[in-house]
Each structure stands twice: as structure tokens, then as C-alpha cells.
Amino acid sequence: MNRWKDWYEQGKRDYGRALVDIQYGYYEWACFTSQQAAEKVVSEAFCWPQGGL
């Protein structure tokens, strides 16, 4: 089962959440959710149907 699209969508949602955290001044949460977003997008790249990076 290939989940690359799931990882990509979750990464986009995490990034959006990080932007909201910044707006409200929750900087430590913004750092955490940004890191999570990046990790999920990188995971997506390795799961890409054509073989990843």
C-alpha cells in the first residue's frame, strides 16, 4: 500500500496549523508543528510512486 498522498496531505495540514500557531503567539507549538510538517513531506517523497528522491 502506497501512502504518499496521505503523508503529503497531513504535512500540508500540519503546516497550516503552524501558521495559526504563529498568529496566536504559540511559537513553541509552531516550531513543533513545522518540524512535523517537514518530516511528513520528506516521508512522502520517499513513498512517491516513481521511487522517491
Image (cartoon, helix red, strand yellow):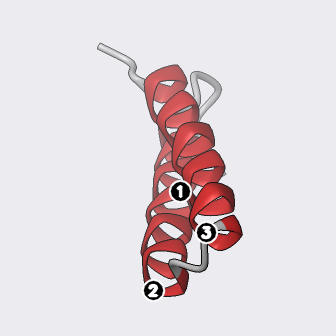
Residue 3 x/y as whole percent:
39, 22
For image coordinates 63% across by 56% down, the residue present is 20
Instruction: Specify the label residue 37 is tagged with.
Output: 1
Image position of 17 with respect to 10: above or below: below
Image position of 13 with respect to 50: above or below: below
Q: Amino acid at mark 3?
A: Tyr
Mark in the foreground, 1 or 2: 2
Q: Quadrant of residue 52?
A: top right
How many numbered callouts? Answer: 3
Nearer to the camera, 6 or 13: 13
For image coordinates 45% across by 24% down, the residue present is 6
- Outermost residue, front side: 24
For image coordinates 55% across by 51% down, the residue present is 17
Residues under numbered marks 1 and 3 in contact, where contact means CB atoms less than 8 Å apart: no
Q: Amino acid at mark 2?
A: Glu
**Which of the image's four quarters has the N terminus?**
top left
Q: Residues within 10 Å of mark 3 (few under 14, many from 20)?
A: few
Instruction: Specify the label residue 48 is tagged with.
Output: none
Q: Residues within 10 Å of mark 2 (few under 14, many from 20)?
A: few
Nearer to the camera, 30 or 38: 30
Nearer to the camera, 33 or 6: 33
Q: Amino acid at mark 1?
A: Ala
Q: Secondary structure at mark 1?
A: helix
Mark in the foreground, 3 or 2: 3
Distance between mark 1 and mark 3 Cα atoms: 19 Å
Task: Decide which of tag 1 and tag 3 comes sooner along the chain.
Answer: 3
Instruction: Specify the label residue 24 is tagged with.
Output: 3
Residue 47 x/y as whole percent:
48, 36
Q: Residues within 10 Å of mark 1 (few under 14, many from 20)?
A: many
Instruction: Specify the label residue 28 is tagged with.
Output: 2
